């Protein structure tokens, strides 16, 4: 076929699977007529190109608008939408080709050397496009490219670029394509999905046939291995987890690229054009294909909205975009959870299905000897013999007789127990059978003592229960056997603190506990390692950890609801009454130790006494420390640090001492005497008169609130201090993963706020702070600060930190003015809702009022709160700053101007109102663009 014989591009059959009528998206006949008329009137080729771009740009805008309206009406019908974007792009490319060969570079002859074929490749070749997808084109020629063909290609590309399309292109012969595809799997994959658009169709068909006969037919195994290696690398780059809370819809685990990889392999091996054809081939069941189709449709719908909302090729579901996309897809708040949380739960459930389909498909490839089988897990040097009723197929565990297996419901649990015992992964045939028969797991089985014995054995006897729990969860067995667990499967917590879904967090916590038992975390968790080595009730600990977040996702406090659920589950699983009571208590109070350590002043004896009264026994304290450590480590990478470790160890040690020696020994007088004795020894080289002066110049709280090392620093800083002098000492505190900043100066009102402001201006995050006034009128203040990454300040940044502190304290920098530029909330963080709550506690300390402020975190928050308290003549003794992603809980131990607790309903209500006003004003400024 020559170009002169090329069919009229307007005469092609119109597609019937678009989101809007084809002519509403792009009327090809009318467009070509308009382009021909405009070209006839143009004075030169430059004018032809300009007129073409002007008209096509208007048509493209109208077409994109029509598709967007269709998506707005049917947001979850993604297949017609992605086809529509591909159809619109086809029309633009063919229109540009038409102008290039008819008006810009008319062919002088019908000779075959002047032939050219325009081919779509990659995702565009698959006819699946989102609003801002790339346009990948192949210009195919029979042999070396001619000057005419080169001119046509160049003119086409300039017009497409002027239309603001992101065009990737290559100009090759059939031989070039074959040669490069042999050496480059990316090129080979792109050519796998070639689709003829315009020009010489015979040339495109020749390439397709040559690829099949000369390359694909003999290299399936290598292609599969390359694609799987590429997939593994991509997953690792995206975080390696299916449940990362800001997933990449395209490249992430369980995303579109995983589905596309399956289809590439299927097309390469089986020469299929549609995924549904895999059902006839026996690769997928009809149900599995439906899962494939639903997952693909959902992921495309999400990706379309990401592109429409941002106006660019955005594939990362960041927190701010999750809210908008959920709204666009029609999700609403219900059952005490936000629309975005329901949306993300659906997302993760689809991502899980993609993983299941991948396993099924790849095992089918192995069965046909196209893909290499997996080896056994590392520590097995020979095949393990399996129990009767099971067999090993392709190095995976399956069952001998499906009917016999299903005749005993307990085999559902025995299957996972045997997989854990032998180390074999489950064969997808076994997985399919389990998923298809989950309805057999009923209340009778749940109450069966043998079933519960097997389940507890999975948790306690095999060494890696997290592996079994993960597969049980993904197949639905865990949710069927423990129906109370099912609501938290794939449940996202919409905040910046938790890195994983609730179910994944729970299983990661179990994995942390396994690692502690194996001694792998002795450096990070020495106390927990010692406790487990000495022995605890493992049934209680593992079950409490499995259930600790089971109450999430409901309006009620999840700890309270979880305890009620644990009260039902523990007896059902065969625990003794005392064990059941301990599991219930641990679930109810699993946040208690973390809250006391991070939100209260451990140096206050009352904190330790109250915590000891709540815990009551050493055994509970031991269990709670291990559970708390696993819970924090399971939140996500970097959440556990030396600061949290130090707080928990101090609280554990002091509480353990109180439980053993009696709560009456935990008092201020005893701590003050011990602190003075320790300082006297540390200042052994000082003159005795100076030592007596130092020991007598401070009030009681000073001795109870600081370590001896810090008191030594203050003693040396105060020595010889002039009334108008400010001294600052900075030191890295590696034990706490923080930088310690000590100040001494003449005391004056509002000093805490000024110090907090100066630190905020250099990006220092305060995690703990204490201020004291000596009897002779000097302020001694110590702040522990971290950088934005939660680490101590580097040595080379210490000088800048010290310089800014001095400028602020000497009035060279006005904190309030400078804070306006610094105190900004990032766009991706603005979607989080954190209602402000302020609690006053006059019972938690013997001499202070405790003010706990729970609100949205931002750079200037501590400064605003401290300044408001100072303006109301409130003296801050200490502050504990706990952050949970975008949430901050700032706790202040305070007195009024007379050194008394703040009493009276009117005073407290007035102070609460002023603090909330300060928070609101600061938040409004921080959210401003």
Image (cartoon, rainbow, N blue to C red):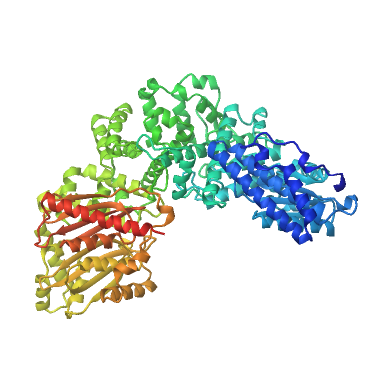
Q: Quadrant of residue 492?
A: top left
- Residues 385 and 122: in front is 122
Query: Residue 299 location, x and y as percent?
Result: 55, 41
Query: Residue 238 location, x and y as percent?
Result: 52, 51
Q: Residue at x 45, y 33 (%)?
A: 472
Question: Residue reaching furthest front?
Answer: 41
| Res. 900 visible in picture | yes
- Residues 199 and 430: in front is 199
Q: Quadrant of the N terminus?
A: top right
- Residues 179 and 416: in front is 179
Does residue 104 sit above or below 353 in this rendering? Answer: below
Does residue 353 sit above or below 313 in this rendering? Answer: above
Q: Quadrant of the C terminus?
A: bottom left
Q: Residue at x 23, y 42 (%)?
A: 620
Tell me if 626 is positioned left or right of 246 in this view: left
Tell me if 131 is positioned left or right of 109 in this view: left
Does residue 758 sit above or below 160 in this rendering? Answer: below
Does residue 742 sit above or below 252 in this rendering? Answer: below
Q: Quadrant of residue 734?
A: bottom left
Tell me if 238 is positioned left or right of 448 in this view: right
Q: Quadrant of residue 710?
A: bottom left
Query: Residue 922 location, x and y as percent?
Result: 31, 59
| Res. 215 visible in picture | no
Query: Residue 175 location, x and y as percent?
Result: 81, 51
């Amino acid at each position: 076929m020559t170009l002169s014989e090329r069919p009229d591009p307007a005469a092609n059959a119109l597609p019937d699977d678009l989101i809007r009528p084809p002519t509403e998206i792009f009327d090809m006949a009318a467009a070509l007529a308009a382009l021909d008329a405009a070209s006839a009137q143009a004075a030169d080729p430059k004018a032809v190109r300009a007129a073409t771009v002007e008209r096509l740009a208007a048509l493209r805008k109208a077409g994109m608008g029509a598709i967007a309206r269709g998506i707005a009406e049917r947001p979850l019908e993604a297949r017609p939408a992605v086809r529509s974007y591909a159809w619109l792009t086809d029309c633009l490319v063919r229109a540009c080709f038409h102008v290039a060969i008819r008006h810009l570079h008319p062919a002088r002859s019908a000779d075959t050397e002047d032939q050219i074929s325009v081919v779509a490749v990659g995702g565009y070749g698959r006819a699946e496009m989102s609003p801002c997808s790339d346009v990948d084109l192949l210009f195919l020629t029979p042999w070396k490219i001619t000057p005419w063909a080169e001119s046509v290609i160049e003119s086409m590309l300039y017009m497409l670029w002027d239309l603001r399309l992101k065009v990737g292109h290559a100009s090759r012969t059939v031989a070039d394509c074959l040669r490069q595809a042999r050496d480059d799997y990316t090129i080979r994959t792109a050519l796998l999905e070639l689709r003829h658009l315009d020009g010489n169709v015979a040339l495109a068909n020749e390439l397709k046939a040559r690829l099949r006969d000369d390359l694909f037919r003999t290299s399936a195994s290598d292609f599969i291995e390359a694609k799987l290696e590429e997939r593994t690398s991509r997953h690792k780059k995206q975080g390696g987890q299916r449940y990362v809370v800001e997933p990449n819809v395209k490249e992430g685990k369980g995303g579109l690229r995983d589905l596309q990889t399956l289809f590439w392999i299927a097309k390469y091996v089986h020469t299929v054009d549609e995924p549904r054809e895999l059902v006839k081939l026996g690769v997928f069941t009809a149900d599995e294909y439906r899962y494939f189709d639903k997952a693909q449709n959902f992921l495309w719908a999400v990706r379309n909205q990401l592109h429409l909302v941002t106006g660019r090729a955005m594939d990362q579901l960041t927190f701010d975009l999750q809210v908008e996309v959920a709204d666009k897809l029609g999700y609403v708040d219900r059952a005490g959870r936000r629309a975005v949380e329901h949306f993300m739960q659906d997302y993760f459930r689809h991502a899980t299905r993609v993983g299941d389909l991948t396993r099924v498909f790849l095992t089918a490839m192995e069965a046909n000897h196209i893909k290499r089988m997996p080896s056994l897990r590392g520590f097995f040097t020979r095949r393990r013999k399996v129990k009767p009723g099971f067999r090993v197929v392709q190095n995976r565990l399956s069952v001998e007789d499906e009917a016999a297996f299903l005749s005993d419901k307990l085999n559902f649990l025995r299957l996972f127990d045997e997989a854990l015992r032998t180390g074999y992964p489950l064969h997808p045939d076994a997985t399919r059978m389990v998923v298809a028969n989950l309805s057999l797991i009923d209340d009778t089985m749940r109450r069966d003592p043998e079933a519960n014995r097997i389940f507890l054995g999975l948790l306690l006897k095999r060494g890696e229960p997290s592996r079994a729990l993960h597969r049980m969860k993904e197949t639905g067995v865990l949710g069927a056997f423990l129906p109370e667990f099912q609501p938290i499967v794939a449940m996202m917590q919409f905040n910046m603190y938790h890195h994983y879904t609730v179910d994944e967090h729970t299983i990661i916590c179990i994995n942390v506990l396994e690692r502690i038992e194996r001694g792998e975390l002795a450096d990070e968790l020495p106390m927990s390692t010692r406790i487990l080595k000495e022995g605890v009730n493992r049934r209680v600990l593992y079950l409490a950890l499995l259930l600790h977040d089971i109450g999430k996702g409901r309006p009620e406090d999840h700890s309270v609801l979880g305890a009620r659920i644990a009260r039902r589950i523990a007896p059902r699983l065969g625990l003794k009454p005392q064990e059941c009571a301990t599991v219930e208590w641990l679930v109810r109070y699993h946040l208690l130790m973390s809250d006391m350590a991070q939100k209260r002043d451990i140096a206050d004896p009352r904190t330790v006494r109250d915590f000891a009264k709540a815990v009551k026994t050493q055994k509970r304290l031991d269990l709670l420390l291990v559970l708390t450590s696993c819970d924090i480590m399971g939140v996500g990478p970097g959440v556990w640090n030396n600061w949290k470790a130090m707080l928990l160890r101090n609280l554990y040690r002091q509480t353990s001492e109180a439980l053993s020696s009696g709560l009456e020994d935990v008092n201020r007088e005893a701590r003050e005497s011990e602190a003075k004795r320790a300082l006297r020894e540390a200042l052994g080289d000082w003159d005795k008169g100076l030592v007596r002066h130092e020991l007598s110049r401070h009030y009681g709280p000073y001795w109870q609130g600081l370590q001896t090392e810090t008191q030594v620093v203050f003693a040396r800083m105060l020595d010889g201090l002039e009334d108008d002098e400010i001294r600052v000492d900075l030191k890295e505190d590696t034990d706490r993963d923080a930088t310690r900043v000590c100040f001494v100066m003449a005391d004056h009102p509002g000093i805490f706020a000024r110090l907090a402001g100066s630190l905020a201006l250099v990006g220092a995050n305060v995690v703990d702070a204490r201020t004291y006034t000596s009897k002779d009128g000097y302020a001694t203040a110590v702040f522990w600060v971290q950088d934005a990454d939660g680490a101590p300040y580097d040595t080379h940044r210490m000088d800048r930190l010290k310089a800014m502190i001095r400028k602020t304290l000497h009035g060279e920098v006005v904190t309030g003015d400078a804070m306006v530029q610094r105190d900004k909330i990032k766009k991706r963080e603005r979607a989080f809702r954190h209602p402000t709550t302020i609690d006053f506690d006059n019972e938690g300390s013997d001499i202070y009022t405790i003010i706990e402020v729970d609100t949205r975190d931002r750079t200037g928050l501590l400064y605003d709160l401290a300044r408001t308290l100072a303006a109301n003549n409130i003296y801050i003794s200490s502050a504990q700053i706990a952050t949970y992603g975008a949430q901050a809980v700032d706790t202040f131990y305070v007195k009024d101007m007379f050194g008394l607790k703040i009493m009276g309903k009117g005073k407290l209500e007035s102070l609460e109102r002023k603090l909330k006003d300060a928070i609101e004003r600061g938040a409004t400024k921080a959210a401003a663009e």
